[in-house]
Image (cartoon, helix red, strand yellow):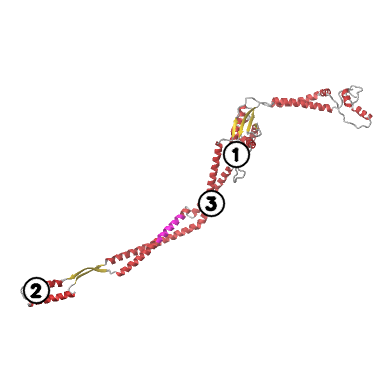
Amino acid sequence: MRAQGVYSEEMETTGSERRGARAPERRRYAYDVDDMLRLLLREWWLMLLVFAIIFGVGAGFAMTLKKSYTADASLLMQLGQDYVYVPAAGDAARGAIATIDEVVQSEVEILNSAELKHRVIEKLGYHAIDPSFPKTFAPRNEIERAQADTRVMRTLSGLKTETAPQSNIVRLSFTHKDPLAAALILNTIIDLYQAYRHEVFMDVTAPLLENQKAAFDRRLRQADQTYEDFLLRNGVGDFQAAKSTYTKLYDTVMSEIYVADAGLATARARLSAITARLGQQAPEMSTERQLDLSVPSKILALKQQRAELLTRYTPAAPAVRDLDEQIRALETMQASGRAIGEKEHRIGVNPVYQQLLTEKLTLEAEIAATSGRRTQLQAQADQVTQKLQSLVGMEAEYNSLATERNALQTNIASFTQRIQETQAAREISEKAQDTVRVVNRARPPDKAKSLQKPVFILAFLFGGFTALCAGLARVFLRKGFLSADMASKTLGLPVLAQAKAK
């Protein structure tokens, strides 16, 4: 042995050679508790150095930790219409609902979303979340905004959510070095979350509807411009009104033509009849006739004269007989009808002939006027017909333009109605009873929490454990034995002598 209490490997090799050709066995140390303690005490300086380094680092880190305040809140998640499946068409799987765990996990995902945290930043500002920012801080560009958001997002990462299986309660906590800021930020997160979740669950087709409506508006403006150019080019203000007006005007003119034709036929028939009657009438007629009644007067006068003569003469007297012969001659003339004749005969205009002639002239004038009117009506009918033919020629193009305009107007009206219905549904949903209720709002915590003490304890324990491990490693890696008893127990050989190290 080269040192006191230390067994040399040369002795071990010599002993092995004396034991013959036995294969070398791995040395096994046989230590009891006292031996281990004595071996560890021999490495106290290494253990102290390791402990001091680790504990010093842990203590230094613990001293850098600041006190923080944790605000707590809780939310009640209920199953609502948002988690009931309603297919867009058909009834396949209609009414399928999510489990309470799925509901809670979905809501927690919304709570932890970056978009919600960015909205908190927009509402509270940078200084309210992180006091290291100036109160009037405002990013000057996107790079500065991104850097500021990164710093503030580290602070907002203090939001913690806790859930339990088959439970619809979500517990929230937010840690901040200012108790008032912790409560304010957590309550702001809850308020914005309740509004943001409505946006998440609202109909995602609303922006698409608005974009499509805007596209239809642009197309309608183009169609209106093309439609107006078409009307101006063809000198038409309103195609349908013009077509209807010309159609009615054509019907009216044709009706007037038919009436004129009927009037002409009637007037010509009457003229023919009147002309025939005129041929049967004389232009003049007898208006007055006076008869000659002198023979009877003469007979009466002769008879009176005979009567006077008979007073003086006899009937056979020659004077009486002369009177009798005159009387007989006159009576014979009267009896033969030659005694009465025309004394005076007047001739005048025939009134029937004059009336028929007046009617004939009136009918001829009426026929001439009606013929002229019919000619003018026919010219108007030709003009209206030509205009209608031109309208018919452009009707195909008009129908194409009008159909496109009407379709666009119908689509715009439909999309406007759907957009309004979507907005109304969103407003009703926002004002209706929410399926997420706040059970407990955050209040400013009155007790601060710090990790200094746990870090000190962990640093002490970890330093001690590491120092012990370093000491044990040093013990087992060191060559030799601490004492003769330890060498004897380990080697199974008696120790004959001890010598001090030179």
Which disc is residue 306 wearing?
A: 2
Q: Is residue 252 part of the magenta span, yes or no?
A: yes
| Residue 456 location, quadrant | top right
262 relative to 428 in the view: left or right:
left
Counting residues from the start of the chain, the first of labels 1 and 2 encountered is: 1
Question: Closer to the camera: disc 3 or disc 1?
Answer: 1
The residue carrying mark 3 is 404
Asked if one can make out residue 59 in the rendered structure from this viewpoint, the answer is no
Measured in 3D between alpha carbons, the distance from the residue under mark 3 to the one under mark 1, in whole angstroms, is 39 Å
How packed mark 1 is, by other alpha carbons closer than 10 Å (few <14, some 14-19, many 20 or more), is some
Residue under pointer 1: 82
Kind of residue at badge 3: Glu
Front residue (pair 287, 250): 287
- Is 29 magenta? The answer is no
Q: What is the x, y in percent for residue 95?
A: 60, 41
* Callout 1 secondary element: helix
User: Considering the numbered disc 3 on the image, is that residue within a helix, a strand or a loop?
Assistant: helix
Taken as a whole, is the magenta stretch helix, strand or loop? helix
Q: CA distance from mark 1 to mark 2?
A: 153 Å
Asked if 380 appears above or below 192 in the picture, the reply is below
Mark 3 or mark 1, which has the lower sequence index?
1
Lower sequence index among marks 3 and 2? 2
* Count of marks, rendered view: 3
- The amino acid on which the numbered mark 1 sits, given as a three-letter code, is Asp
Occupied quadrant, residue 194: top right
Name the residue type under label 2.
Arg
User: Which range is magenta?
Assistant: 243-258
Residue 52, relative to residue 399: is it above or below?
Answer: above
Q: Residues within 10 Å of mark 2 (few under 14, many from 20)?
A: many
The quadrant of the picture occupied by the C terminus is: top right
Q: Nearer the viewer, mark 1 or mark 2?
A: 2
The location of residue 385, given as percent across then percent down, is: 45, 59
